[in-house]
Amino acid sequence: MSESGTTAPGAGEEHELRRSLGFRDLVVYGLLFIAPMAPVGVFGTLDAKSHGAVALVYVVATVAMAFTAFSYAQMVRVVPQAGSVFAYARVALGDGAGFVAGWMAMLDYVLIPAVAYLFSGIAMEALVPDVSRWVWTALAVVVTTALNLWGVRAAARAGFLVLALEIVVLLVFVAAAIVVLARDGAERGWLSPLSGDGTQGAFALSAVVGAVSVAVLSYLGFDAIATFAEEVTGGSAKVARALLFCLALAGVLFVAQTYLVALLEPVTSAELAADPGRQGSAFYDAVDSSVGTWLHDLVAVSKAIGAAFAALAGQAAAGRLLFAMGRDRRLPGALARTDGGVPRVALLVAAVITLVAAVWAARRDDGLDQLVSVVDVGALTAFTLLHASVVGWFAVRRRGGPVSWWRHVLVPVLGAAITIAVIVEASGTAQVVGA
């Protein structure tokens, strides 16, 4: 590994991954896991909580998550290993911290795909109600697992096509929204998505911060890019660039779509706050009333397919994390075996866990609530340990060359403070919506 500050324990031909991913592939995986239209499901909740300043919420959330992306970029350059935050915490903070970080990240990479598969099953059941959602959910797991077992390049190619579909649908929405706004005008003030709609009083920074605690959770998954550090061609600096680029691009997409849909929204933030039952469908309702049901259906189909492939990216990341923990003997060594450079044993284990969780949730009325109750706290705890790893590696152990107090101390300390604040602020409802 050309840029490694440390090598993978137990590395050998049997425990090596095939290097075949480029910059575009990494960005595709990151955007697939996040989903370009992630705000669709949370728009109503964020609009109500922020008093209408929903686009500003995503501006602040993107800046907040940039601290985490920056810390990932620091660590992936010196520890370019498949275990991501598990590997970083292990070498910088010790085996115990690495084990905890690995399990916290596993909650993210295993259960978020289960939630995404469930969303896909729900969407398909709405289109074909004669088939139960758990059947659609299981089918989505099987199809995407087959792609992952085929190899990371095959999965990346399929993922690129799905991501292209999602981007096209998003562009159609943007174009349709601009046409409607130019023709009919906005339902709210043109600056209201950044300053609030005024129906819940004057602009309140506390309301925006409270909404950010939900919006930040929508970004969970971009960090999965770091788990492919041992499969990228051209060095780990490419992983760092992909992390930062993916987050920035997602932020632009999120701000743009929430700004436009807020201008189309005929329902005020106060009305949404008074009737939480309308929040989940607020994006769709705004599209229906302003553009038409055809765009509603197009977005729904895109979300159904996109959710399944978001789960594909998450399952691939989970497989790499299991592979790394098996190679380090924190889990059974069989998980570290590869076949043609593909960690098929680890992928199958991740798939089985995800399948059981997703189908179990699909057959229960409260399955979604049960699944996401632990996801976000686990991921954010892993992020906190990531920030601590930067300080531990560069400032305490001084293993990464000269210490930069703003890059290696100030930024990670601020990042840890943000993730801890989000953990504290995020209510159970926020965790459900954010996931």
Image (spheres, rainbow, N blue to C red):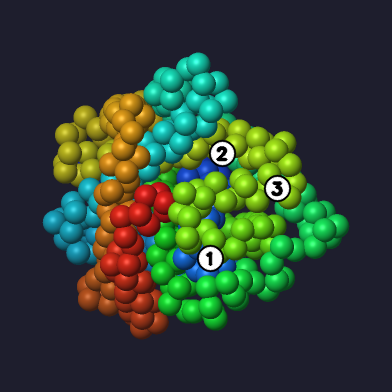
Say above or below: 60 vs 386: below
**What amino acid is at disc 1?**
Ala
Image-based side of 330 in relation to 261, left or right: left
Q: Which one is earlier in the sequence, the residue at label 1 or at label 3?
A: 1
The CA span between labels 2 and 1 is 27 Å
User: Where does label 3 land, which residue?
Assistant: 289
Residue 58 visible in the displayed image: no
Q: Residue 270 has which mark?
A: 1
User: Do the residues under discs 2 and 1 have CB atoms within 8 angstroms?
Assistant: no
**What amino acid is at disc 3?**
Ser
The CA span between labels 3 and 2 is 19 Å
Q: Residue 303 has which mark?
A: 2
**Where residue 270 sits in the image (x, y, percent)?**
53, 65
The residue shown at (52%, 43%) is 32
Asked which secondary structure carries label 2, the reply is helix
The residue shown at (43%, 25%) is 133
